[in-house]
Amino acid sequence: MTTSQAVALATPPVHRAISVFSSEADFAAGQRLCKALTSSNLVPVSYQGEGNMGNALIALDMANRMGIPPIMVMQNLNVIEGRPSWASQFVIGALNSCGLFSPIRFRKVKLGEQEVSYERWTGPKGNRSKETVKAKVVNIECTAYAVEKATGETLEGPTVSIAMAVAEGWYFRPGSKWVTMPDLMLMYRAAAFFGRLYAPHILNGMPSADEVLDIADFKDITPKTETPAAETAAKPAGRARGVHAAMAAAKEADKPKAKAKAAPTIIEAVADELPAHDEDGVLLEDGEGNAGGADGADDVFGTDDDDDNYDPA
């Protein structure tokens, strides 16, 4: 056996990283790999089960492009308001392990107490106004830097400061960690800026989770409490409730109204005056009532002479 053959046998075979979406064969192979990942309870919930196979395929493709294990992508990829973002500690780890730079280092400068102004919107919805607020903070600047291995040049990222966090609205955001952990947030943000400037391909162009949390405009989706019965009774009965009710009321108002039916005409009929009769209903002869005429002309049965002249023919 020659030396070259021995070296070839000792060298482990190089496996081509699977690009999941490059061909049907790679897509099928990626599905087989993701089936094992989605059946594990060590991955986050958003990747567990067959229904999340698509998420696992995307995570596998990103892991192959970055040259890291898929579980690392799954554990550090956060989706906030529909936007995928990296955990800040993952950003620093990816930059330190990419081989392009020396380990990331940070330079901090304390500038003392300063007065910083920022703008905010106040007032009810539909009548909001912008106001300028001034606040005093202990300002600190932080800059991430590293040595590029290919050239030996020291690369510095954009400087981040507490004054910047206040002006951008990050500092006083509800639930902000800038107030309680300013040093850590400064280093996280400085590293994210450095990576997006000098190694965007390492992070696939995605921001850090802290950046998305600071920039995203979250909506309050807390369910409202039920309206007390007294307040409900005070509302007008015909008042529309909600958008759908208002639309239904508008459609009902646009419908053509039915024409009112004309009132039926009442005709008053006057009955003819009946001949005079007694209490038993027997007609009275002439002179016994007021209905008959003087000569018996109004007698419905005629006169006795008419009976004598009766002719059956």
Image: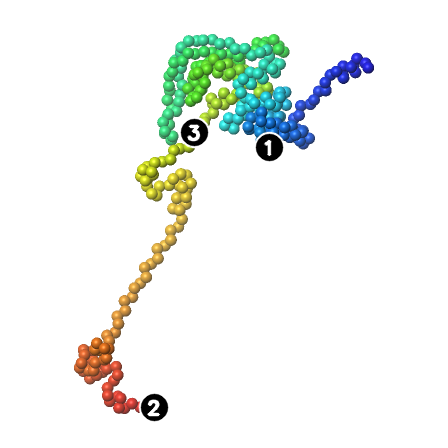
Figure check: 195 above or below 239: above
Q: Residue tagged by mark 3? A: 220
Residue type at mark 2 is Ala
Residue type at mark 1 is Glu
Figure check: 105 above or below 45: above
Which residue is located at x 53 percent, y 15 percent?
191
Q: Is residue 198 left or right of 272 when viewed as pictured?
A: right
Which is nearer the N-term, disc 1 or disc 2?
1
Q: Nearer the viewer, residue 57 or 226?
A: 226
Quadrant into which the C terminus falls: bottom left
Which is nearer the N-term, disc 3 or disc 1?
1
Which residue is located at x 38 percent, y 14 percent?
136
Residue type at mark 3 is Asp
Q: Nearer the viewer, residue 10 or 117?
A: 10
Residue 263: percent from the left, percent from the top?
32, 59
Q: The residue tagged with tag 2: helix, strand or loop?
A: loop
Q: Is residue 2 left or right of 50 when viewed as pictured?
A: right
Q: Nearer the viewer, residue 13 or 271?
A: 13
Residues at marks 3 and 2, CA–CA distance in whole angstroms: 109 Å
Quadrant into which the N terminus falls: top right
Q: The residue tagged with tag 3: helix, strand or loop?
A: loop
Q: Residue tagged by mark 2? A: 313
Residues at marks 3 and 1, CA–CA distance in whole angstroms: 32 Å
Q: Is residue 165 at all visible to an observer of this figure?
A: no
Q: Is residue 191 left or right of 110 when viewed as pictured?
A: right
Query: Quarter of the image holding residue 267?
Result: bottom left
Q: The residue tagged with tag 1: helix, strand or loop?
A: helix
Q: Residue tagged by mark 1? A: 50
